[in-house]
């Protein structure tokens, strides 16, 4: 257990710690600070505030790790039905830059069953080494065996940096591994870099609703772990015929144990186009007025061969499923064309789509913030404008 101690001989009774404590856990008694352990969360704010080094926080975790034993940049390569997901190639592209800056190897981790050829193929995307574990329990993603096997690999080979996609699977997996590895984790990064002097991973992500960008480091723990949003980094180019070293590992049967059983994978009906991969997205918001309004969105998407997106308001109103949500708590998308129909353009939505190449906004309010990021803006009623656009594309495309 972590513990906190006040060195009374150093405490001057200045009360800085009382003011700094966000939990009201410190009071003064006879001009000395006293901590109420029922309220203290061991956050360390008082330690930072104290100018007299009178408060000491001892972290749990036994002997300190030898950080110098950790090397190489690892990318967890997510696969579905044996197909490596494009986010993994994006991470290999970024991982290459980081590994070169650190002067270490770029390594991929692949978990699955019978994927030897896929493991070899990761060399063509820049992996110098591939750690590959094949077992029936790893065929499709399951929390327990995936996190246990990845944690064992980390424990044995000690990567300096471990990257994972901020996908549904990635988020579920990597938080479990971070706990097992006693490491920190920066979620949803949009940029990564290296501080070459300290060999620290600089992990940048939006904070406070996207109003500021925070750069986070993990100086005291290894590996330095981050999840990265889809579509914010460039895929590693294919280098045909590039070889890699595959390290095929196996573990005792208990490593693959699971408290849950995967009965069946069911594809979501209607989500036929993967939003994150789509070149054209037609998205609707509260301004579509209801489920029937989304029929107009679907019609336009169909004519253009695009995917349907939505704001959180539309998802919360149950007009469309969460799989379609774009934004801070939904998907990040970078299509060639993004239609925003009846979407006001709040920052949490913009975070997920503002890097689209062309943004077409339809809104009846000329002051709507979406027009500030739009390439083309149409002020008007979505019930008239969207069907008119659909009709025109149908005519032009002969559909
Ligand atoms: C922590 C957090 C995370 C969030 N994550 C997300 C997220 O991932 N994605 C997301 O989208 N939001 C997210 N939100 C919510 C976000 O703040 C907004 O509330 C939401 O994006 C608004 O959705 P909207 O634009 O559809 O609705 P509104 O803001 O209500 O806008 C509706 C727009 O439609 C227009 N309109 C109305 N009728 C018509 C019509 N007939 N014709 C044309 N225009 C019309 C209006 O002028 C208005 O501009 C999050 C919020 C928080 C606090």
Image (cartoon, rainbow, N blue to C red):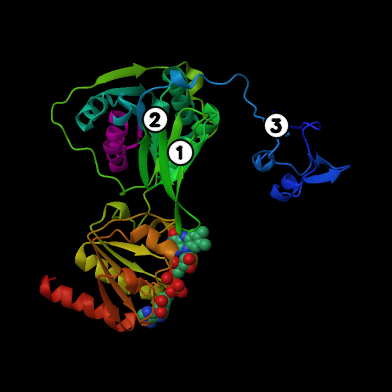
Label 1 element class: loop
- From the top left corner, tell me how far across and down residue 324 is, in percent: 38, 59
Q: Neighbour class for label 1 at 10 Å: few (<14), some, many (≥20)?
A: few
| Nearer to the camera, 131 or 252 | 131
- From the top left corner, tell me how far across and down residue 73 is, in percent: 35, 28
Q: Tell me the tag on residue 263.
A: 1
State ligand 1's quadrant.
bottom left
Magenta range is 76-100
> Is the residue at mark 3 in contact range of ligand 1, meaning its CB lies under 8 Å from it?
no
Q: Neighbour class for label 2 at 10 Å: few (<14), some, many (≥20)?
A: few
Question: Of the residues under marks 3 and 1, which one precedes in the sequence?
Answer: 3
Q: Tell me the tag on residue 56.
A: 3
Question: Of the residues under marks 2 and 3, which one precedes in the sequence?
Answer: 3
Quarter of the view holding residue 5: top right
> Is the residue at mark 1 in contact range of ligand 1, meaning its CB lies under 8 Å from it?
no
> Number of marks in the image?
3
Q: Neighbour class for label 3 at 10 Å: few (<14), some, many (≥20)?
A: some
Label 2 element class: loop
Residue to which mark 2 is pinned: 197
Residue plotted at (38% across, 23% down): 135
Residue plotted at (28% across, 42% down): 86
Looking at the rendered image, the quarter that the N terminus falls into is: top right
Q: Residue furthest right?
A: 30
How far is disc 2 from disc 3 in space, using C-alphas? Answer: 28 Å
Q: Tell me the tag on residue 204.
A: none
Work out whether 195 lies above or below 299.
above
* Residue mark closest to the camera, 3 vs 1: 3
Q: Tell me, yes or no, whether the highlighted magenta stretch contains residue 266.
A: no
* Residue mark closest to the camera, 1 vs 2: 2
Question: Of the residues under marks 1 and 2, which one precedes in the sequence?
Answer: 2
How far is disc 3 from disc 1 in space, using C-alphas? Answer: 50 Å
């Amino acid at each position: 257990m972590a513990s906190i101690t006040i060195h009374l001989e150093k405490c001057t009774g200045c009360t800085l710690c009382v003011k700094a404590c966000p939990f009201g856990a410190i009071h003064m008694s006879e001009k000395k600070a006293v901590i109420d352990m029922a309220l203290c969360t061991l956050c360390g704010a008082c330690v930072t505030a104290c100018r007299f080094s009178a408060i000491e926080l001892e972290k749990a975790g036994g002997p300190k790790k030898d950080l110098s034993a950790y090397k190489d940049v690892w990318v967890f390569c997510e696969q579905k039905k044996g197909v490596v997901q494009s986010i993994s190639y994006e991470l290999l592209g970024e991982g290459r830059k980081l590994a070169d800056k650190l002067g270490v190897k770029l390594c991929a981790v692949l978990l699955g069953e019978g994927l030897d050829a896929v493991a070899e193929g990761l060399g063509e995307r820049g992996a110098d080494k591939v750690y590959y574990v094949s077992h029936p329990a790893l065929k499709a993603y399951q929390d327990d065996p995936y996190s246990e096997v990845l944690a064992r690999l980390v424990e044995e080979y000690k990567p300096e940096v471990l990257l994972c996609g901020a996908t549904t699977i990635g988020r579920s997996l990597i938080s479990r591994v971070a706990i097992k590895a006693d490491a920190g984790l920066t979620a949803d990064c949009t940029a990564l870099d290296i501080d070459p002097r300290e060999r620290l991973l600089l992990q940048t992500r939006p904070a406070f609703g996207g109003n500021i960008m925070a750069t986070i480091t993990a100086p005291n723990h290894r590996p330095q772990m981050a999840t990265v949003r889809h579509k914010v980094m460039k895929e590693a180019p294919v280098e045909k015929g590039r070889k890699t070293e595959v390290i095929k590992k196996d573990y005792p049967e208990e490593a693959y144990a699971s408290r849950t059983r995967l009965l069946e994978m069911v594809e979501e009906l209607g989500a036929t186009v993967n939003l994150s991969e789509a070149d054209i997205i037609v998205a609707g918001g509260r301004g579509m007025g209801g489920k029937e309004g989304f029929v107009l969105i679907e019609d336009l998407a169909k004519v253009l061969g695009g995917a349907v997106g939505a704001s959180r308001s539309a998802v919360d109103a149950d007009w469309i499923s969460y799989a379609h949500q774009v934004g801070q708590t939904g998907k990040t998308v970078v299509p060639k064309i993004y239609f925003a129909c009846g979407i006001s353009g709040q920052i949490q939505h913009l975070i997920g789509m503002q890097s689209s190449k062309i943004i077409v906004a339809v809104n009846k309010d000329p002051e709507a913030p979406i027009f500030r990021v739009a390439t083309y803006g149409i002020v008007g009623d979505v019930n008239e404008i969207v069907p008119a656009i659909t009709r025109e594309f149908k005519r032009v495309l002969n559909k």
